[in-house]
Image (cartoon, grey):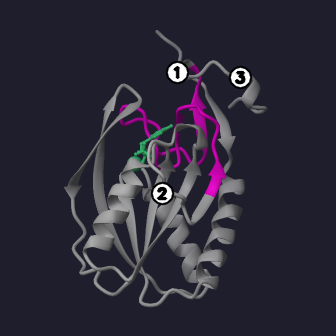
Amino acid sequence: MTAAPRIRVLFDEDTIAKRNEALAQEIAAAKPENLLVVAVLKGSFMFAADLIRALHRSGLAPQVEFVHLSSYLDGTISTGNVTILRDVESDVRGRDVLLVDDILESGRTVTFAKDLLMARGAKSVKTAVLLEKPGKRAVQIHPDYVGFTCPDVFVVGYGMDVAHSYRQLPFVGVVDHLDNSPDLFDKPE
Ligand code: IMP
Ligand code: MG
């Protein structure tokens, strides 16, 4: 029997929860009107769920929508094509939209979604990403709200997967066999 791969914690539950509250306060301070949160499935579902509850605590009452996008992957590398697997149902015309995604890597997914919502007549589209990997940007996009800057490793947990596994983890971590940089982490799980 092979042992289950170890997951090294990169951002723990407590750190993420505190950052979500701070992000929500920042978002609320900009006083969005008629706010519509659009969460990009699947990877952002946990971040979005926590962030919208933090937005509620910060005094906002956003409506919530989902778009399911797929960026074609070759292994764990994005090839650049983005397609809509499930679209939003709401009319975004004239609305302040907050687009929520898990990771900004090449930037293609968030750029695709932002352009789509702007083309449909949103008044504004701001972007909130849990993680930003600065080293891999292929298109120019500056997210409005960033949870954490992430090292250039493949991460899982807190909604993010590798081959459909690990989404349930309440923290962001790195699967040992996908990464050989133990120096990045101080706390093996
Ligand atoms: P981008 O279009 O290259 O910015 O890729 C962003 C999408 O790729 C994210 O929304 C994730 O779904 C996925 N992705 C990128 N890096 C990782 C990772 O380290 N773990 C899990 N998913 C990732
Ligand atoms: Mg994604």
**Could you tell which of marks 2 and 3 lies nearer the N-terminus?**
2
Q: Quadrant of residue 58?
A: bottom right
Q: Does dot 1 land on a helix, a strand or a loop?
A: loop
Relative to 56, does residue 176 appear above or below in the rendering? Answer: above
Of circles 1 and 3, which is in front? 3
Q: Earlier in the sequence, mark 1 or mark 3?
A: 1
Q: Residue furthest front?
A: 140
Do callouts 1 and 3 mark residues in contact (Cβ within 8 Å)?
no
Residue that badge 3 annotates? 182
Q: Amino acid at mark 1?
A: Ala
Q: Is residue 167 visible?
A: no
Q: Secondary structure at mark 2?
A: helix
Question: Which residue in the structure is indicated by mark 2?
Answer: 46
Give residue 76's position: percent from left, percent from top: 41, 29
Q: Secondary structure at mark 3?
A: helix
**Residue of label 1:** 4
Does any portion of residue 18 appear in the rendered image? yes
Q: Which residues are magenta?
A: 147-176
Residue at image position (55%, 82%) is 56
- Residue at the location (57% across, 50% down)? 131
Give coordinates of residue 29: x percent, y percent.
64, 84
Amino acid type, label 2: Met
Q: Is residue 111 above or below residue 175?
A: below
